[in-house]
Image: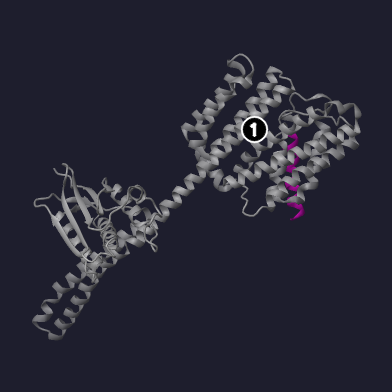
Amino acid sequence: MPAARYIRDAAVFAPCYIMLDWASYIAPLGPYNITPWNPQPALAIVWMLLGGLHHLPVVAATVFLADVLIRHAPAGVAVTLLTSAVLAAAYGAIAWFLRSQPRFHPGLSTTRDLTLFATATLAGTAAGGALFVGVLTAAEPSFAGSFLEAWLRFWTGDAVGVLVTAPLLLVATDGERRRALASLARRPEAALQMGVVAASVWLIFAGLPGDPSRHFYLLFIPLIWVALRGGMEGATVALGIVQLGVVLGMHSLGVDWLPAVELQALVAALTLTGLYLGIIVDERGRAAESLRQTLRLAAAGEMAGAIAHEVNQPLTALSNYGRSALMLLERGGEGAAQLPSTIGKMLSEAERASDVVRRLRDFFRAGTTRLEPVPATQLAAAAERIGRQVIGASGVAFSVRAEPGLPPLYVDRLQIELVLRNLIANAVEALHDRNAGEVTVAIGRQGASHLRLVIADNGPGLDPEARLRIFEPFVSGKSTGMGLGLAISRAIVEAHDGTLVAASGAHGEFHLDLPCAPTG
């Protein structure tokens, strides 16, 4: 690391650390001058976690300087040098432990990251606090009578300060989370949420009589609201407001050390609850987005059969028209006069193929649909064609029936053909061990605004448990299946304002309800 950068970083870190120590120097305990909230260790830990352990000497020097300037070195300069080295080593051990963990992300992206961070913080601050107070006790025997009290206060002050402040610093230094935090700040709901959190803190310390710890439960409700809506970013900001309010409240009320420790223990519980809830919300959002992307890509793969058929038809026509054009050119005379008409048909088929490819591209990009009126007779013909393709030489009987006079549907024809292909293929596969297998597709009215397609087979049907889970992603009854076909089919149908259900009965039967084209 270049010396100039090292000096620059140290010149920024040291004043910030000392200012945090000064700002949090509230209600110091006895000869130790220990305070109930210490956010400055979080700055040291985050600096070494992100920048490296070579910053340890600067951290030790800064801790010593802050102890002299703010806490007045209660045991003398020599002992303060030793305690500063002890604290710097404890903070460095926390940073080293986190840096050494495989797949640990400083942005606290997963519950595993948060668990490692919380465990290291609680253990490191406990050990550091015990050594710190132990050194002071050994140097000044008059301090010995308050060792447990001092260690407990030191531990809670450091632990809560790091648990609350470090995640906020880590969020601020992570590019992706910083953008999410900026986006959160622009939401009016976020301002309302933080206002409710601040009002709850005021109510606990000033609005309600008695011990503030008795009313601390009031903070869990707005924190849950913030975490559910704002994820990790919202939780860290809300917890920072809570911690600041608690410290100011303790200062204004003049609470003694035991209530202060109790309040900080409640803050620690609130902090871990909020952080875990925020990360779980973030993980769920990432999982949902990943699943949507997986379904979209899988749907594109499932559509390949339908798309290939649609593109094959115009390409075949283009080939035939091309051969016709060559023959007309060879004839010359009257044949040449028919060329414009033939070329026009070629351009039309080329445009048809281009339209199919364009719709596939749009589906890849955004999963969009192109709704258009599709006559019921055309859908019946498509079902007939798909059924013949799927059945092939399997010997399964296949038939399509449609009520007369049905109104047109309002659907994306390619996507609905994909759904039909999935349903018919599933019905045929359910008959693999039947000698007289039969699959039928019946189209009829379903209320005033929908048509119902019933895809049925004379196979064994689905048991109740399978019927409940059959549309879940990655649930498949086939050894080679991915379990995405029916999940994609239902998603497509619901995007059309339709429904797809597995009907109960002795045989397999799916009900596909699709909207009719609007009239007038």
Q: Is mark 1 on a helix, strand or loop?
A: helix
Q: Which of 333 and 414 is in front in this view?
A: 414
Horizontal and vertical percent position of residue 65:
82, 37
Residue 18 locus on image (x, y percent) = 75, 35
Residue 107 location (% of width, % of height): 60, 46
Q: Give the vertical position of 30 relative to 3 (above or below).
A: above
Residue type at the position of mark 1: Ala
Residue drawn at (39%, 54%), measured in percent from left and top?
Answer: 475
Vertical side of 249 occupied by 46: above or below: below
Q: Does the magenta stretch include residue 474?
A: no
For the image, the number of numbered tags is 1
Extreme bottom residue here? 330
Rendered view: 361 above or below 490: below
Relative to 497, is 72 on the left or the right?
right
Q: Which of 17 and 218 is in front in this view?
A: 218
In this view, 83 is above or below 444: above
Residue 39, located in which quarter of the rendered image? top right
Q: Is residue 450 left or right of residue 133?
A: left
Q: Is any part of residue 20 visible from this angle?
A: no
**Residue 378's spot in the image, x, y percent?**
16, 58
Place residue 73 in its image quadrant: top right
Q: How is the image coloured?
A: one colour
What segment carries the magenta color? 1-19
The residue carrying mark 1 is 268
Q: Residue at x 55, y 28 (%)?
A: 220
Q: Which of 471 and 85 is in front in this view?
A: 471
